[in-house]
Image: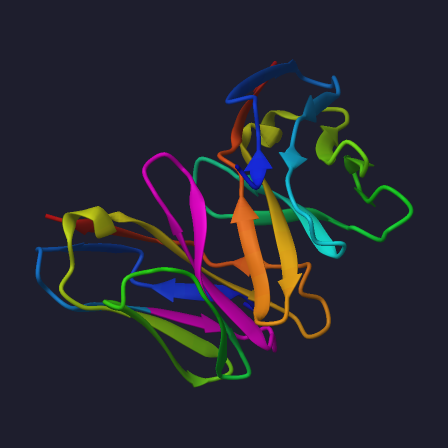
Amino acid sequence: AQKITQTQPGMFVQEKEAVTLDCTYDTSDPSYGLFWYKQPSSGEMIFLIYQGSYDQQNATEGRYSLNFQKARKSANLVISASQLGDSAMYFCAMRENRDTGNQFYFGTGTSLTVIP
Amino acid sequence: DTAVSQTPKYLVTQMGNDKSIKCEQNLGHDTMYWYKQDSKKFLKIMFSYNNKELIINETVPNRFSPKSPDKAHLNLHINSLELGDSAVYFCASSPPARKNEQYFGPGTRLTVT
């Protein structure tokens, strides 16, 4: 089974609108972390936001918030007030904590295009 | 500038050659990683080093070997390059006690012909 599933290969959003990028994960570990990264067309990977499995509140970083629904194993990224510079690939990732170290898994990404 | 840097940015080489990609971070981080991003944009972790100790070794071919001369460097050496090794390779690092944050280098686009 896929560890991280991003079902939206491409998304469009109007500038200044909010958009939700979906991410579901699969793990049986009680302790794990969830991440979102942004990859613009220039290719670099930019860390956006993190949610720990034991965190009680949803993580927020500026215009980014992570809608963490543990029972549903979903970790959707919400971008508020979209800007043209938000156009990029977005990757959801999960870290499982193992005795041998951390295992990281990435989704296949969602391409977001912000329309002026 | 404080950052994660990689050299070279582009690498074109022939099958069978041996090549290295260098990574340096001056952020004072204690854990460094190598990722491979294939043509379909899928990212896969390859290695992780913490204080010069390998703590993750995904099932990558043993032609790939990470080398860490010190905490600030994690180089990737690849022997006998194959066509399937063509990809973008990212180095990343994370700070002590904050493994939830990973800072990526600009990537190295490797093309094997």
- For residue A17, side relative to residue A88 (left or right): right
On whether residue B43 falls in the magenta region, the answer is yes
Of the pair A27 and A67, the residue shown nearer to us: A27
- For residue B46, side relative to residue A101 (left or right): left
Query: Could one spot residue A91 in this view of the protein?
Result: no
Of the pair B19 and A56, the residue shown nearer to us: A56
Q: How many marks?
A: 0
Q: Main SS type for the magenta part?
A: strand
- For residue A10, side relative to residue B88 (left or right): right
Question: Residue B18 in the image: x percent, y percent?
Answer: 15, 68
Find the magenta span and give its range.
Answer: B22-47
On whether residue A80 falls in the magenta region, the answer is no
Q: Residue at x 65, y 32 (%)?
A: A23
Q: In which quadrant of the rendered view does residue A80 lie?
A: top right
Establish if A72 lies above or below B24: above
Of the pair B65 and A19, the residue shown nearer to us: B65
Question: Residue B25 in the image: x percent, y percent?
Answer: 50, 72
